[in-house]
């Protein structure tokens, strides 16, 4: 293989809405880092990485960042991952500097994902020059731990568990006194948004990234009014910068990488959340509980379980119980969350 690139920034954007968001992400990144190639993993690249298959459900798109990072890490010394629904508002020096093998950014949301003592890590902004990080993050999502949580939080929880266990070397860069914040969403950090001399602040925090994570409405018009002029400025068309030829690289290295994946999936034990976080498992809708790889050619299939969600009128809340499809008496005809 040719000598690896020193740096590459990438995002994952499948679908028209995500691609529209990614244009702002790419333009704003290039404005501050015109010398670093930027790659958008779209449908074509996704199919190559996923064995020719389109995503079966949105959670698979969320997991693609780790799998794509694993492949790209074979060709790039340091990778910067950015969610498509964000804008870069300044130079991301700590993401670029390889003095720290892996850097993560903090998620200030109150939701603990059932593990209150885990570090609050957001998977939307991170960087790594540690080749071990990407397969270490991929494995929990596709194999040995498949956290099944409401929405698509399993990639966040798997990352938090990795950081909690200190299985790779890294540092959480947000939250240090006097340091800029590399990942700020609308509801995070106290105070109002403001722009001073071209720099964005949320309260006292200098924000280098504005992230619309979890928002129902996205785009510049949905951003805080004080930020909108700056977002338009950094989203303006910038001169084309260096790119990364994913397709040619895949044509050269894809078969070898696919064989690595096949062997890895064969080694990873298949578990579900019940084996790791039993209390949390009992609270989650059935159809999120298992996307574990029963076999290589089925690893992207959603594997349903016998857990179902039912509305308990007496308690006025949902309850979860195992059901036996061979015994109709155990299957209630009320609302379920499983398949």
Image (spheres, grey):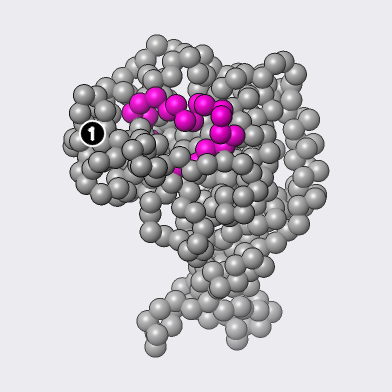
Q: Quadrant of the N terminus?
A: top right
For label 1, the residue is 227
Would you call the spot at circle 1 few (<14 residues within 10 Å), some (14-19), or many (20 or more)? some
Can I make out residue 138 in this image?
no
Q: Is residue 201 left or right of residue 280?
A: left
Q: Position of residue 26 (x, y in %)?
A: 42, 25
Residue drawn at x 26%, y 36% is 201
- Name the residue at 67% across, 45% down: 136
Identify the residue shown where x is 69% and y is 53%.
143
Instruction: Point out the residue furthest to the top here.
Output: 239
- Name the foreground residue: 218 vs 97: 97
Residue 19 painted magenta: no
Q: Quadrant of residue 224?
A: top left
x, y (%) of residue 98? 56, 28
The answer to whether residue 107 is visible is: yes
Looking at the rendering, the stretch of residues picked out in magenta corresponds to: 85-105
The foreground one among 76 and 27 is 76
Residue 247, x across and y down, in percent: 64, 22
The answer to which image quadrant residue 276 occupies is bottom right
Which quadrant does the C terminus fall into?
A: bottom right
Percent from the top left, x then y, of residue 126?
A: 50, 37
Secondary structure state at the residue bearing disc 1: loop
Q: Is residue 108 above or below residue 67?
A: below
Describe residue 9's horizontal placement relative to residue 323 as left or right: left
Q: Does the magenta run of residues contain 86? A: yes
* Number of marks: 1
Q: Is residue 59 left or right of residue 145?
A: left
Residue at 34% across, 17% down: 237
Residue farthest along the front direction in this orientation: 177
């Amino acid at each position: 293989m040719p000598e690896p690139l020193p740096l590459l920034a990438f995002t994952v954007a499948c679908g028209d809405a995500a691609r529209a968001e990614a244009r702002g992400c790419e333009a704003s990144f290039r404005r501050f880092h015109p010398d670093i190639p930027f790659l958008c993993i779209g449908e074509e690249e996704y199919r190559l990485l996923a064995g020719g298959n389109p995503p079966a459900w949105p959670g698979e798109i969320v997991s693609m960042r780790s799998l794509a990072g694993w492949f790209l890490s074979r060709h790039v010394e340091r990778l910067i991952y950015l969610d498509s629904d964000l804008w870069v508002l300044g130079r991301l020096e700590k993401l670029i500097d390889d003095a720290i093998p892996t850097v993560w950014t903090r998620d200030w949301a109150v939701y603990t994902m059932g593990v209150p003592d885990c570090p609050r890590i957001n998977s939307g902004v991170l960087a790594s020059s540690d080749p071990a990080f990407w397969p270490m993050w991929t494995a929990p999502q596709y194999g040995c731990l498949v956290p099944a949580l409401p929405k698509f939080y399993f990639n966040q929880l798997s990352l938090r568990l990795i950081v909690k266990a200190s299985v790779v070397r890294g540092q959480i860069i947000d939250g240090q006194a006097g340091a800029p914040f590399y990942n700020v969403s609308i509801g995070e950090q106290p105070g109002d948004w403001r722009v001073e001399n071209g720099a964005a602040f949320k309260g006292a925090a200098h924000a280098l990234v504005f992230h619309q994570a979890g928002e129902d409405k996205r785009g510049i018009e949905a951003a805080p009014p004080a930020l909108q002029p700056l977002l338009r400025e950094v989203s303006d068309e910038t001169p084309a910068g260096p790119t990364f030829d994913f397709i040619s690289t895949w044509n050269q290295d894809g078969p070898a990488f696919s064989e690595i994946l096949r062997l890895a999936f064969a080694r990873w034990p298949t578990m579900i959340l019940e084996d790791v976080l039993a209390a949390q498992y009992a609270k989650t809708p059935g159809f999120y509980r298992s996307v574990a790889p029963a076999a290589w050619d089925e690893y992207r299939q959603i594997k349903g379980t016998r857990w179902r969600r039912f509305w308990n009128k007496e308690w006025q809340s949902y309850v979860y119980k195992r059901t036996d499809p061979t015994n109709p008496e155990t299957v209630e005809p009320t609302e379920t969350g499983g398949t």
